[in-house]
Image (cartoon, grey):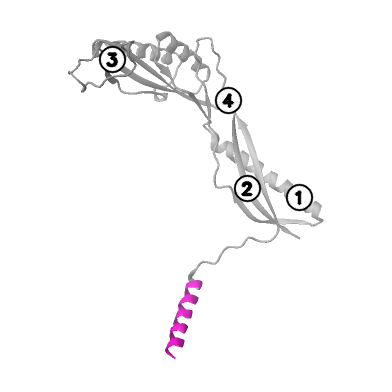
Amino acid sequence: MKGFLILAIFAALFSNALQAQPEKRQRPAGIEVIGKGEVIVKPDTFIFTITISDRAETANAAKASVDKKSKELLSLADKLYIADKDIESSQLRIRPIFASEHSSSSNLPQKPGNGPQQRPALIEVSRNITFTLLNFNHYDQLLEKGIQLGVSSVSRLRYEVSRADFFYQQALEAAIDDAKMKAQRMAKQANVTLGPVKYLKESESFAPRRVYGMTADAPNYQSLPAEQQISAQVQLIFEIN
């Protein structure tokens, strides 16, 4: 009797646990298709960073050189009517350069703590200036000026689409149209009549693929922005009449 009572209690608990679980949502029966759509767009925002640096015996001398080059570059940006909000200038970075670091006889820098204390042979000062351009023609002009100034490096150019959401909506509409056409062809081949949509799901992951272009390495280089593909995907189930 005692064993039967324990078994009854266990069965009751198990039954309550099953009832507490949410019922799985079943998809309706019908023709299930996946539609895909894409829109090819030209990027309209261009971002890159120019690093300006110089070395001198004193930090003030190196800073003066970096400031002078920075002002010349920003002066060109002003003439190109690039807004201040589209220019980001980082704080100066200062780094001591010890004799072993710039000596041609050794490529391995020695730490100041090793052996007798050393005084830096040079002081390196650098600054990053990041431009966000809305006119791609300004890229080559700023790049050429940077090369003339002898800048240290130029980052890879990043292309972006400012209205990615707008173009995604177009890709989404194309994906739904694609799904409808697939369902119609399937219904025709199966000799059935296509009914209304009973299930519609948008793909959870979408994003315009970022495209990176190589920066120019010569003043005569002409850059061309790459196109971007914005895609969408949907899943539809049509009722069969």
Residue 209 falls in which quadrant of the image? top right
Secondary structure beneath dot 1 equals helix
Q: Mark 3 Cα within 10 Å, few/some/many (few <14, many 20+)? A: some
Residue 141 shows up from this direction: yes
User: Amino acid type of disc 1?
Assistant: Gln
Q: Tell me the CA gap for discs 1 and 3.
A: 75 Å
| In this picture, residue 7 sits left or right of residue 23 | left
Q: Earlier in the sequence, mark 3 or mark 4?
A: 3
Residue 67 visible (yes or no):
no
Q: Which badge, 1 or 4, is on the more N-terminal residue?
A: 1
10, 237: nearer the viewer: 10
Amino acid type at circle 2 is: Val
Query: Which residues fall within the magenta stretch?
Result: 1-18
Q: Name the residue under label 4.
A: 226
- Give me the C-alpha separation between circle 1 and circle 4: 36 Å
How many C-alpha atoms fall within 10 Å of the one at disc 4: few (<14), some, or many (≥20)? few
Q: Which amino acid does label 3 sit on?
A: Ser
Q: Whole-Å distance between the Cαs marked 2 and 3?
A: 61 Å
Q: Give the alpha-carbon distance from disc 4 to disc 2, as whole Å.
A: 27 Å
Q: Residue 66 carries which label?
A: none
